[in-house]
Image: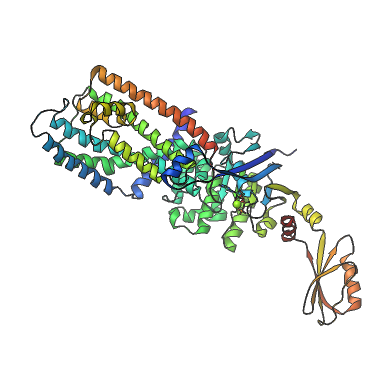
């Protein structure tokens, strides 16, 4: 019964992959942008590390790995759920999602997973190649960190997706959430350690960042990857990441329940 | 005894329109307070539809037809009241109940613009867990009337309106639901597409005993398909009953059209009303209870020489005009 229910979503996922491959969405812009960020920040960090001394225990090689993995992670953290909800609410097509024997957020999640699967080939691999050829091959610090990285990355995906879904549900109360979606995007870029790791910030600012969910999206999995964090410190951070996941899950469940009852269908 | 397929009890829907403000400031403000205005779109509707009925659900623009259809198909949550589909409350068990419902909105599509029609069908086949053999059989039946296999490899974005509506109709029937809701399915279609659509609806109703609720502004649809009418206005029930009974009750008259030899001194008659003259033609509206057509013709022919006569029954357009006018 349960499994049969899942197979419905599996097919939605499959169809989304087909859509992404047959109907070419704009994918090259992101490769270009991520490559530029990778290469320019590689110049920047090499210049900064000219003296050869590690900063906060991270040497230049670690830093270069950090930026390449960060660029690759950004592909896995692309979400469309916020725009999908906004669009469906504005155009009234949410009716078409509501009349199916599926959970609408389940649909949006597997659609995002389908798009990301397609992007692994269209976007993540090219970025990996550009990074490996022009900067360095981003090897993980130790094989023991592979499962830890995978777990942390999985949690980071859901934290990121839930935040996006929550922002998307904002469109039930506000006309135009475009501006908000943009703000969210830049907040995550700047405050998550995706471009500048937080260990370059003063302590007081780092303390604030550690209390927000954003660093658990990029910084923590990256720290695990390059071996910046390990042992008790790492366990503690992953606990906080898990707590954020639970908090966001509860917030999402609450808002989603209220929002689906309030669905309005424009037009018709 | 007939099986109750749809039960609507004391159904109401209010729209709370929130005055939304533009931009970031508006979005943040909207979280905390908002100016609200209430529109009472549906007011205390009560009706029951039996298995195998085709019901015309009509009313003027803004009457609340689409709102009611959306509630009955699980898209909107009622403000109050209850909707049972085959005995199960759709508001409480949406996912289970919609498995037994098909919906077509003439003005939108549930097909995926980026996919070929067949790919959209295949997606639906998985979502509704339809067995492949059953799916092929259903498709064969529908192909006979709608020629659907001809367009099955066409991307939906390249389809004409008529083709798309046919696709949507098939999509709504793939899982053989017991109930089919159609909201203005024939809007914008040409004569032959309308004909095919009506034939299809009649056929599935006959063969599969599908219960159909149909909103339309096309009188032809009603004449061809519906034995029963539900008329609403301003969200309230105006009429619910047999089409013929409603006509007899609201518009219990006929119109006698008389063509005289010439246009001079066209006579009137005390037991009927002359509603129009045009050259040598005159239209007399008479109550069936007041006078028979035969008597009227013979009395008029005594006053002036008649060339030809014909009798028009009161039609749906008359009742609609009267009912909407109230
Ligand atoms: N999303 C919405 N938000 C606010 N008010 C709405 C919304 N949808 C419909 N209404 C209002 O509810 C009332 C009923 O609308 P509805 O669409 O049900 O009418 P209808 O009978 O389908 O009309 P039509 O024949 O024009 O399709 C109208 O006054 C309409 O303005
Ligand atoms: Mg309507």
Considering the image in quadrants, where does the N terminus of chain B appear? top right
Considering the image in quadrants, where does the C terminus of chain B appear? bottom right
- The answer, for residue A76, to whether it is visible in the render is no
Coloring basis for residues: rainbow
* Residue A92 in picture, x, y percent from top left: 51, 47
Q: Is residue B86 left or right of residue A149?
A: right
Quadrant of res A7: top left
Q: Is residue A145 above or below residue B51?
A: above
Residue occupying image coordinates x 24% and y 38%: A71
Camera-nearest residue between B86 and A195:
A195
* Residue A117 in picture, x, y percent from top left: 33, 39
> How many numbered discs sit on the rendered protein?
0
Quadrant of res B314: bottom right
* Residue B2 in picture, x, y percent from top left: 73, 39
Q: Residue furthest left?
A: A51
Residue occupying image coordinates x 50% and y 28%: A1
Q: Is residue B126 above or below residue A24?
A: above
Camera-nearest residue between A166 and B111:
A166
Q: Is residue A185 left or right of residue B206?
A: left
Q: Is residue A141 above or below residue B77?
A: above
* Residue A256 in picture, x, y percent from top left: 48, 34
- The answer, for residue B297, to whether it is visible in the render is yes
Residue occupying image coordinates x 29% and y 25%: A207
Q: Residue furthest top?
A: A232
């Amino acid at each position: 019964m349960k499994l049969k229910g899942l197979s419905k979503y599996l097919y939605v996922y499959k169809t989304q992959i087909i859509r992404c491959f047959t109907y070419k969405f704009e994918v090259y812009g992101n490769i270009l942008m991520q490559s530029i960020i990778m290469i320019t920040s590689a110049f920047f960090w090499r210049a900064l590390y000219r003296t050869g001394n590690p900063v906060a225990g991270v040497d230049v090689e670690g830093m270069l790995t950090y930026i390449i993995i960060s660029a690759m992670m950004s592909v896995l953290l692309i979400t469309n759920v916020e725009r999908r909800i906004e669009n469906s609410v504005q155009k009234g097509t949410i009716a078409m999602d509501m009349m199916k024997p599926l959970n609408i957020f389940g649909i949006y999640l597997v659609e995002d997973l389908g798009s990301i699967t397609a992007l692994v080939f269209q976007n993540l691999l090219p970025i990996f190649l550009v990074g490996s050829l022009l900067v360095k091959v981003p090897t993980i610090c130790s094989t023991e960190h592979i499962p830890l990285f995978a777990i942390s990355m999985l949690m980071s995906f859901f934290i990121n997706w839930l935040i996006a879904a929550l922002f998307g549900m904002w469109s039930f109360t506000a006309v135009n959430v475009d501006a908000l979606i943009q703000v969210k995007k830049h907040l995550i870029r700047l405050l998550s350690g995706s471009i500048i790791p937080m260990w370059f910030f003063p302590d007081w600012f780092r303390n604030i960042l550690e209390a927000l969910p954003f660093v658990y999206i990029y910084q923590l999995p990256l720290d695990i990857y390059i071996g910046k964090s390990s042992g008790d410190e790492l366990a503690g951070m992953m606990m906080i990441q898990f707590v954020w996941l639970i908090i966001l899950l509860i917030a999402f469940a609450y808002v989603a329940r209220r929002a689906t009852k309030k669905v309005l269908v424009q037009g018709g | 005894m007939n099986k109750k397929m749809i039960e609507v009890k004391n159904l109401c829907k209010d729209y709370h329109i929130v005055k939304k403000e533009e931009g970031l400031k508006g979005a943040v403000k909207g979280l905390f307070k908002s100016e609200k205005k209430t529109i009472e779109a549906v007011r205390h509707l009560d009706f029951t539809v039996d298995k195998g009925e085709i019901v015309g659900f009509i009313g003027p623009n803004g009457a609340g037809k689409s709102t009611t259809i959306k509630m009955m198909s699980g898209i909107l949550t009622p403000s109050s009241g209850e909707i049972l589909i085959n005995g199960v409350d759709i508001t409480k068990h949406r996912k289970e109940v919609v498995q037994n419902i098909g919906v077509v909105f003439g003005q939108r599509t549930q097909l995926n613009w980026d996919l070929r029609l067949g790919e959209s069908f295949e997606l639906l086949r998985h979502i509704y867990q339809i067995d492949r053999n059953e799916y092929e059989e259903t498709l064969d039946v529908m192909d006979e009337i709608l020629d659907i296999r001809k367009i099955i490899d066409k991307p939906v974005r390249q389809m004409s309106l008529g083709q798309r509506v046919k696709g949507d109709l098939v999509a709504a029937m793939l899982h053989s639901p017991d109930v089919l809701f159609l909201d203005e399915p024939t809007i914008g279609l040409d004569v032959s597409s309308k004909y095919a659509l009506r034939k299809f609806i009649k056929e599935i109703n006959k063969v599969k005993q599908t219960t159909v609720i149909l909103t339309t502004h096309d009188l032809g649809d009603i004449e061809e398909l519906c034995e029963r009418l539900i008329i609403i206005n301003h969200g309230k029930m105006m009429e619910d009953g047999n089409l013929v009974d409603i006509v007899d009750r609201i518009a219990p008259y006929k119109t006698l059209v008389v063509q005289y030899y010439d246009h001079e001194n066209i006579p009137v008659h005390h037991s009927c009303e002359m509603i129009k003259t045009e050259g040598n033609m005159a239209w007399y509206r008479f109550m069936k209870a007041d006078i028979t057509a035969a008597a009227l013709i013979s009395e008029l022919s005594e006053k002036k020489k008649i060339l030809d006569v014909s009798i028009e029954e009161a039609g749906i357009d008359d009742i609609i005009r009267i009912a909407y006018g109230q």
